[in-house]
Amino acid sequence: MLTLLVIILLLIAALYVHDRVQTRHAILRNFPVIGHFRYFTEMWGEYMRQYQYLPDWAERPFNRLERAWIYRTAKGLSNLISFGSETIPRFVFRNSAFPVLDEEKSAWQSKPIGISTGPGACQTPFTPRSFFNISGMSYGALSSAAVSALSLGAKKAGIWMATGEGGLSPYHVQGGADLIMQIGTAKYGVRDAAGHLSEEKLRDIAALPQVRAFEVKLAQGAKPGKGGILPGNKVTAEIAAIRGIPQGEPSLSPNRHTDIGTITELGDFVARVRRVTGKPVGVKFCLGDPEFLDAWFADCVARAQACPDYIAVDGGEGGTGAAPAPLAEYVGLPITQALPDVVAARARYGLADRIRIIAAGKLITPDKVAWALCTGADFVVSARGFMFALGCIQAMKCGSGKCPTGVTASEPRLIAGLDPADKSERVARYAARVADEVEMIAHSCGLKHAGQFTPRHVTQVERGVSGFRNGE
């Protein structure tokens, strides 16, 4: 009996050592031995859930089917399914009777962001290499290891990565990926001692070749009308230095730019940033009142020098590390309403060739990305999709700093569990698979590439009604 006990203890010790040194699973590195129970229940859950009342698509904010698709994709595993669909779709794509053959396919044709001549021109327009890219996530909201993994993975996948409003960190830069520098309401990273825009710091960041564009953030979908929130326990000395704020104190951004209170001031700010940096400038916002679009686009027509090079539309269902529940749940139009409104307004004012549209808001799987492209988006970005690719398990601990996978952790012990080299491969695989399967949908619709999607290729399903409704 004693011998058996010794053998069991030695096996547990060996497993402990193995879990601590392996790099593929952050949960096992951070929680040796006991972490295996998660993977055991995950493995057998698919079979056991037939005896339970909670279906795979019932979880929130992202259900098990969505997360499992990303996990398998990021690991390079098969995503083929058996026995038929498990979802009740809100929309379907109109497949062609004669899909495109392999030899008829062509590469997606990118569109430049920014113009090189005329009013509102910039010195170096940016032509992205992919229609699916990484949305803004700040260092501080994410751990250093997570940002490094995203940067390395973005470079491998040939996609861009936005910095989030927390400023440009060394971890964003180290991978060598194309970057979009976001300017939030607190102007972290480009602020002077008084909190105003520093043209000197702006110029220094623009000199980095990886920084391809700048993004003026008015609001994000998770908390329209509320600035960024980073708890004081996550404001380390390094983060404080990058942002230009006191260490250990909560980082609370104003609910809007203090120097942007009108459409005219917004246009002037866009023109100023473009003049100083020589690079394209976009605006990120969450749509509330559609009348704002008419006033804004009319100003773009009247003052071409003040027109943004792109608009990033974030749906009200967008994510964040910390947000008040009323704003997260009840403020801001969802992307399914906001995106069509923005696309239609752009067309009314003849700005389709001038302003690119980037869509965001739970667009994490190929079907949703393809829907956005059909609706009129030029590009799609995701934050939480790439967090899942890093290993996020939706533990809902983002604001606490105690994320068990190290993705949003602030404790060094937990951050050490996330290996950037391994996770960067998962980021790249996820980005590539999404793009490939969006193209697969396009080919099924009889299109040579995803850039040919139009509203007629997607149809909304009428719930409780036999039949469909045209998505145009």
Image: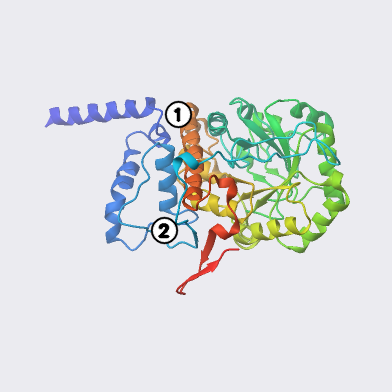
For this rendering, which residue is in front, 404 or 168?
168
In the displayed structure, would residue 30 be above or below residue 354? above
For this rendering, which residue is in front, 33 or 382?
382
Mark carried by residue 57: 2
For this rendering, which residue is in front, 357 or 107?
107
Q: Is tag 1's residue or tag 2's residue first in the polypeptide sequence? A: 2
Q: Residue at x 81, y 55 (%)?
A: 296
- Quarter placement of the C terminus: bottom right
Q: Name the residue carrying label 1.
A: 422
Determine the secondary structure under disc 2. loop
Residue 342 visible in the snapshot: yes
Q: Residue at x 83, y 41 (%)?
A: 120
In the displayed structure, would residue 353 be above or below residue 22? below
| Quadrant housing residue 288 | bottom right
Residue 320 visible in the snapshot: no
Residue type beneath disc 1: Asp
Residue type beneath disc 2: Trp
Determine the secondary structure under disc 1. helix
Q: Could you tell whether 260 is left or right of 126 in the image?
A: right
Q: Could you tell whether 37 is left or right of 184 in the image?
A: left
In the displayed structure, would residue 127 be above or below residue 311? above
Q: Residue at x 32, y 39 (%)?
A: 36
Q: Residue at x 55, y 46 (%)?
A: 450
In the displayed structure, would residue 151 be above or below residue 359? above
Identify the residue at the far bottom of this view.
Answer: 465
Coordinates of residue 256 in the picture (x, y in percent): 77, 50
| Quadrant housing residue 317 | bottom right
